[in-house]
Image: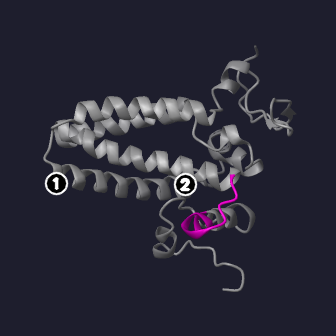
């Protein structure tokens, strides 16, 4: 194994079962493996997180309060998702180290948006961030904070699921078709816009919606 490169490895290496080569981000094979996640691993990890969180939140609040906290957590996620995508994932900076970080976290996805193992956030990033959010919720609300965290995490799992589906499935009908079209225009029409994945209303409210062809 080599050491991690301080520049994205823009060359490509063969990876099975993909027919296309995958963008290589690190010289180290270990670090490279940490940048990908399969749908099965994603489901298992977050199912485990939900089981732990739900058991810890059990009977910490009334049913009405729990519903309110879940809804609030979900709403907070949608704003977090929009802000993260707009200001962090598409951060324009002249500092090379931060350009490298942006490419590692998101830029590589724009170079190859069809890689199924990079359509969801790898656990090396998502789990520590999730744990930090959980800690903040507990600090803010005590034991009830776990309910808020569950709502937030439901939003995250929906986000990654929808994002994966936008790149891997046809999604030809109804709301799913609208979500796919919205995100596809972010990739293939103009990357500075359509930042929301699950709550596309935010792009309208914040003036970042990319108009559809013809209007």
Mark 1, other Cα within 10 Å: few <14 / some 14–19 / many ≥20: few
Examine the rendering and report whether any part of residue 131 can be seen. no
- Residue 144 found in image quarter: top left
Tag 2 and tag 1, C-beta contact below 8 Å: no
Image position, residue 198 (x, y; %): 50, 59
Residue tagged 1: 64
Q: Which residue is depicted at the point 72% across and 51% down?
A: 110
Give left or right: position of 70 versus 132.
left
Residue 85: numbered disc: 2
In this view, the residue farthest toward the left is: 62
Image position, residue 21 (x, y; %): 85, 36
Q: Which residue is depicted at the point 17% across and 49% down?
A: 63
Image position, residue 170 (x, y; %): 70, 59
Give left or right: position of 207 versus 20.
left
Task: Tell me which label, 2 or 1, sits earlier in the chain.
Answer: 1
- Tell me, yes or no, whether the highlighted magenta stretch contains residue 112: no
Q: Which quarter shows the C terminus?
A: bottom right
Numbered marks: total: 2
- The magenta-colored residue range is 169-179
Q: How is the image coloured?
A: one colour
Q: Nearer the viewer, residue 101 or 111?
A: 111
Give left or right: position of 117 versus 157.
right
Q: Secondary structure at mark 2?
A: helix
Q: Which quarter shows the N terminus?
A: top right
Q: Which residue is depicted at the point 15% across and 38% down?
A: 60
- Residue 78 found in image quarter: bottom left
Residue 102: numbered disc: none
In this view, the residue farthest toward the front is: 173
Give the CA distance from mark 2 to mark 1.
32 Å
Mark 2, other Cα within 10 Å: few <14 / some 14–19 / many ≥20: some
Q: Secondary structure at mark 1?
A: helix
């Amino acid at each position: 194994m080599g050491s991690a490169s301080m520049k994205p490895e823009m060359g490509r290496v063969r990876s099975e079962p993909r027919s296309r080569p995958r963008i290589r981000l690190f010289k180290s094979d270990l670090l490279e493996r940490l940048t990908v996640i399969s749908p099965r691993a994603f489901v298992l990890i977050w199912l485990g997180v939900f089981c732990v969180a739900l058991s810890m939140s059990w009977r910490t609040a009334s049913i009405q309060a729990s519903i309110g906290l879940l809804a609030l957590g979900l709403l907070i996620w949608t704003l977090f998702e929009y802000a993260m995508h707009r200001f962090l994932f598409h951060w324009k900076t002249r500092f090379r180290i931060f350009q490298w970080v942006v490419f590692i976290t998101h830029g590589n996805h724009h170079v190859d948006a069809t890689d199924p193992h990079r359509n969801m956030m790898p656990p090396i990033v998502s789990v520590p961030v999730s744990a930090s959010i959980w800690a903040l919720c507990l600090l803010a609300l005590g034991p009830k904070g776990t309910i808020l965290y569950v709502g937030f995490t439901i939003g995250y799992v929906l986000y990654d699921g929808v994002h994966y589906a936008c790149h891997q499935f046809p999604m030809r009908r109804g709301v799913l078709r609208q979500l796919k079209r919205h995100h596809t225009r972010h990739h293939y029409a103009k990357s500075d816009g359509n930042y929301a994945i699950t709550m596309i209303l935010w792009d309208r409210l914040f003036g970042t919606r990319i108009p559809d062809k013809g209007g």
